[in-house]
Image: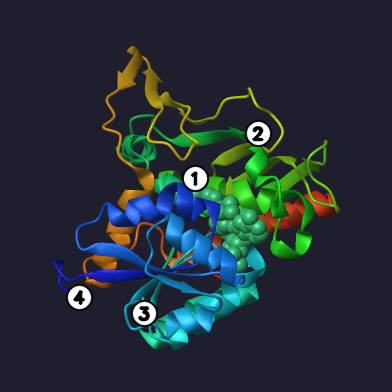
Amino acid sequence: MGSNQRIGWGLIGASTIAAEHMIGAIRAQQGQDVVAVASSNAQRAKDYAEKHRIAGAYDSVAALLADPAVQVVYISTTNELHRDQVLAAAAAGKHVLCEKPLALNLDDARQMVRACAEAGVVMATNHHLRNAATHCKIRDLVQQGSIGRPLYARVFHAVYLPPHLQGWRIDKPAAGGGVILDISVHDADTLRFILGAEPVEAVGVSQSAFLAREGLEDGVMAVLRFDNGVLAQLHDAFTTPFAGTGIEIHGDKGSIIGRNVMTQQPVGEVLLRDADGEHAIAIEHENLYARGVARFCAAIRGEGEPAATAIDGLRSLATALAIAEACRTGASVRIDAHQA
Ligand code: NDP
């Protein structure tokens, strides 16, 4: 596809994330449009299509995939559906941008990655945080040696799940609900991106305070060990409206403090603290989702890789599953990055 060629996107899932972020991010790109949506419910597909000015409204994935105007699909259904929908898209020769977590287990995720590779379609994972100007800057600072040897990371990603999202995430284990598959999976990807290292071990404890039901967790504290020796502490929750978000990377020569950066918005600040004092780092914010879409489209044209590849999605899932197992068993769980 040439850079001026039109790309038609099909949405699999009449979802909130597509409505709030992705439709706009896609339409912000030159030559790209959302041309179809598929829902399991015909009326919801029709209403969603009307509301968002989408030409095609389908009540099945098969019908959407048969629409010749669709070259690329964005999958944002509940998590148990991602596997079969990615496999169907690959079989139809469509490029796939899939939401996280890619699947509910690693075998399924591996099957998805393999199917896309064999079909010759690009598959990417919609990990938005590595598209934040803040996280890109933090990664640059770490890789340039600004804090010396990185030793510790702390991730503050305890938020309040907005009422309009208090559905399957808190009461449907079969849909891949719970804070670990929802939020810890993003932390894992962000840390891998910033540190350029792989998590190899997880411990953790979780909480079901008042939002989550059916055995799901609505809060977790976990520690990851990375293959470069870094220890990373994660705090993720659905239940704390006022905690604020952030990330810190601490090294033997300095510390990086990112405030209000674990978010969908292009906001937040980054500070570098070292022997010379504390410095605010200049950030040119840009829309996280639009940047991800732009990278994905470039990859389709053969220009580089998506911001977060299918393998990145596999590895973040492996880490989240290890945290979940550690919480369940009370044991330390090994993460085999190469196996993942
Ligand atoms: P939603 O609950 O909004 O949508 C998920 C599915 O629920 C839809 O596909 C839809 O099914 C169904 N649904 C939506 N609205 C209704 C309704 N009013 N009545 C009945 N069913 C409804 O989920 P999210 O948009 O929050 O999340 C979707 C996916 O995106 C998940 O995989 C999640 O992890 C991921 N996500 C990623 C984010 C990121 O920043 N990367 C942020 C938020 C979510 P149908 O399509 O059949 O109509």
The secondary structure type at the circle numbered 2 is: loop
Dot 1 amino acid type: Leu
Q: Earlier in the sequence, mark 1 or mark 2?
A: 2
The secondary structure type at the circle numbered 4 is: loop
Q: Disc 1 marks which residue? A: 191
Q: Disc 4 marks which residue? A: 1
Task: Tell me the distance, in whole angstroms, between the alpha carbons under discs 4 and 2.
Answer: 41 Å
Q: Earlier in the sequence, mark 4 or mark 2?
A: 4
In the image, which disc is placed on residue 121?
3
Note whether ligand 1 is within 8 Å of mark 3: no
In the image, which disc is placed on residue 160?
2
Judge depth for marks 4 and 3 and give the one in front: 4
Residue 322 at x, y = what percent?
69, 57
Note whether ligand 1 is within 8 Å of mark 4: no
Task: Tell me the distance, in whole angstroms, between the alpha carbons under discs 2 and 3.
Answer: 37 Å
Dot 4 amino acid type: Met
Judge depth for marks 3 and 1 and give the one in front: 3
The secondary structure type at the circle numbered 1 is: helix
